[in-house]
Image (tube, grey):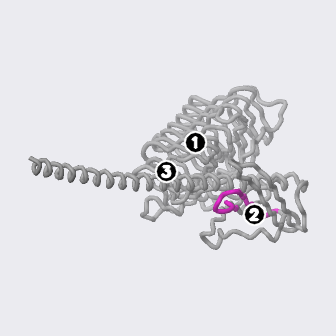
Amino acid sequence: MKRYHTTTAKVLSGKEGSALMTAIIAMFVVSLLVGGYMTLTSSEYRLARRSLLIGASFSLAEGGVDLAIDALNDKDTSGWNVSGSTWTRKVTGLEITNGRTGSIRVVIQDATGPNSDTPTIHSEGIVSGHPSGDVTKQLQVALNSGFFPYKNGFDSKNGFVLKGQNVTMDSYSSDIGPYSSSNRGSEIRVSTVSIETDAIDIGNANIYGYVAVGATLAAGQTGSDVIDVGKNGTISAYGESQIVQEDRILTDYYASFPNRAAPSVSSGWVFPISGTITTSGTYYVDGDWSLGGNSGSLVIAPNIDVILVVTGSFELKGNATLTLDTDATLKLFVEGDVSIGGNGILNSSNPEYLEVIGTNTNEGEQTIKINGNGQLSASVYAPNANVELKGGGSSGRVYGAVVAYDASLVGNSHFSFDEALADVNLGGTDYEVFEWLEMTNTTYETTAVALDSYF
């Protein structure tokens, strides 16, 4: 009995030892897993924190650019150190988060002197207090004197949505002639200053040109990560097979779109208006204006320059037309909605001669809509309007350039940017952003400039 019990005790002791060893191994494995998870979590936290600070330094650099442009436009050197044609400024002690502080260093070259119409800004945002050192972002901005509203082709503040099939955006040059298979290019820039992810939704549209967004790429991201491209969507050039070309997706886009007011007038036509305008001048419609039916048409006679100011809405429908004859020009200022539908044609042989200006100053409260077989050959400047190109019908087309608040193109819409409009300068002494580069040190052109010698 003793042997039996002794043997049993030994057997039980062996089982208990095996169970204990298994538990120890399991605890060791769990400890490794927990330790690895904690290390990974800590690493991700540090990366997320540094990414946040990179964004903060970029915002500081953008703030420096704004300071520089405002100083140049106002010709105000207050707070700046001036040495010949170079202005410098440093802002320090900016509170960021969790004990981190920020500073800005800005250098303006050619602020005065013979090259003062094309100054260059270097702005550097610095966030201090991170354990691994300062986080720095530098921007280089080239300016032009004047205002070039149509340099890209299709601009918006808030973003784009392209829906449906057969939506196409490309370019041509009216300096060569009308749009055709031999006069078409891939130079349009579909651009938005929005920094929201997927601010531009390409869907299945074909963009023969470039796409630019205000978003900054995070580590490991590509341009297509911040732009939503559908399975059949393309961003490329005519004659190239690659569907989405990364070098045609641009980020860190910046632009400003000031409001444009209508000229002051005290008298003019009484609604409705139709017929032929044979005298140059400024005309005024107090309220809504509609051209419709088969007879409601307006023609601007050859070599006549006309300004039309409409305080209400403007509508072109049915078979009505608004046409510019040879070398006639029209600036149409509209405060309300604009609708071009049916077979209505608002056209000019040269889009530079016809400009539609939305004067509503409230973002999103004006709509400019082209649908059916409506055609538009013009430049449209409406930075607070929702621009909608719908349907397109069998012949609906838009030629020219557009600046909008928000935009959508749906089904069969075809927009062609007139490259000749890129050089249109509306004048003025204010400065316009010509080129904007984030100095990432990835190429010779984007190598950061040492600013220490200026301070």
Q: Magenta span covers which residues? A: 117-138
* Mark 2–mark 1 CB contact (< 8 Å): no
The residue labelled by disc 1 is 407
Residue occupying image coordinates x 65% and y 59%: 131
x and y percent of residue 31 in the render? Answer: 40, 53
Distance from the alpha carbon under mark 2 to that under mark 1: 32 Å
Among numbered discs 2 and 3, the one appearing first in the sequence: 2
Task: Write down the quadrant of residue 174 in the picture.
Answer: bottom right
Number of labels in the image equals: 3
Residue 133 is covered by the magenta coloring: yes
The residue labelled by disc 2 is 122
x and y percent of residue 441 in the render? Answer: 63, 69
The residue labelled by disc 3 is 168
Depth check: 312 or 228 in front?
Answer: 228
Left or right: 232, with 282 as reference point = left
Depth check: 264 or 407 in front?
Answer: 407
Distance from the alpha carbon under mark 1 to that under mark 3: 14 Å
Distance from the alpha carbon under mark 2 to that under mark 3: 37 Å
**Label 2: few (<14), some or many (≥20) within 10 Å?**
many
